[in-house]
């Protein structure tokens, strides 16, 4: 175990074969630490919101000019296997998932590249 800066924070290394080490921290196990972190999170959000929200609004309006929704939503699996929905500013074309499926169905070489790496050198989206 390694000692790091914040009070009782401890990092322990978790090794997974073939991957870089992952460090976990049980420092939020006490009620006090969870409460302090929540207060800090809310404070920082309130502090940053007046600066960040106008930028998000401006970027959202610029994306809307391209057509379609400015936001991309996706269901993800989080802590304890619970599903949650994320909202992100759209960075790809509208209906990117459907367009990717069509390209992969039409091009076996592209499909093989996608199945191997989940990435494409010439991504059509």
Image: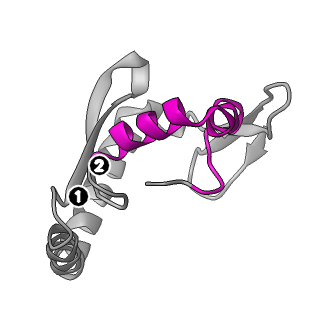
Secondary structure mostly taken by the magenta-highlighted segment of the chain: helix
For label 2, the crowd category at 10 Å Cα-Cα, with few meaning under 14, some 14 to 19 and many 20 or more, is few
- What is the quadrant of the N terminus in the image? top right
Q: CA distance from mark 2 to mark 1?
A: 6 Å
Give the residue at mark 2: 38
Residue at the extreme right? 18
Q: Is residue 34 above or below residue 91?
A: above
Magenta stretch, residue numbers: 95-122
Q: Residue 35's x, y, as percent?
A: 30, 43
Quadrant of the snapshot with the C terminus: bottom left
Q: Quadrant of residue 20?
A: top right
Nearest the viewer among 33 and 117 is 117
Q: Quadrant of residue 92?
A: bottom left
Where residue 59 appears, x then y in whole percent? Answer: 23, 75
Taking depth in this image into account, of 113 and 12 the one nearest to the observer is 113
Give the numbered dot on residue 42. Answer: 1
Left or right, residue 100 beside residue 61: right
- Residue at (60, 57) in percent of width and height: 122
Q: Judge the density around disc 1: few (<14), some (14-19), many (≥20) Cα neighbours within 10 Å.
A: few
Proximity of marks 2 and 1: CB atoms separated by less than 8 Å: yes
Instruction: Please say whether residue 32 is visible from this viewpoint.
Output: no
Q: Examine the image and state in which quarter residue 107 appears.
A: top right
Please check the rendered image and state whether residue 113 is part of the magenta-colored stretch, yes or no.
yes
> Residue at image x 15%, y 56%?
69
Residue 56 visible somewhere in the drawing: yes
């Amino acid at each position: 175990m390694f000692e790091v800066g914040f009070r009782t924070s401890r990092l322990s290394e978790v090794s997974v074969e073939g991957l870089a080490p992952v460090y976990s921290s049980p420092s939020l196990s006490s009620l006090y630490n969870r409460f302090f972190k929540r207060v800090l999170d809310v404070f920082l959000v309130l502090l940053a919101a007046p600066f960040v929200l106008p930028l998000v609004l401006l970027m959202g309006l610029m994306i809307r000019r391209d057509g379609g929704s400015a936001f991309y939503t996706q269901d993800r699996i989080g802590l304890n296997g619970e599903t949650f929905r994320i909202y992100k500013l759209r960075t790809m074309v509208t209906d990117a998932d459907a367009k990717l499926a069509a390209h992969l169905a039409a091009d076996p070489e592209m499909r093989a590249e996608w199945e191997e790496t989940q990435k494409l050198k010439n991504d059509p989206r």
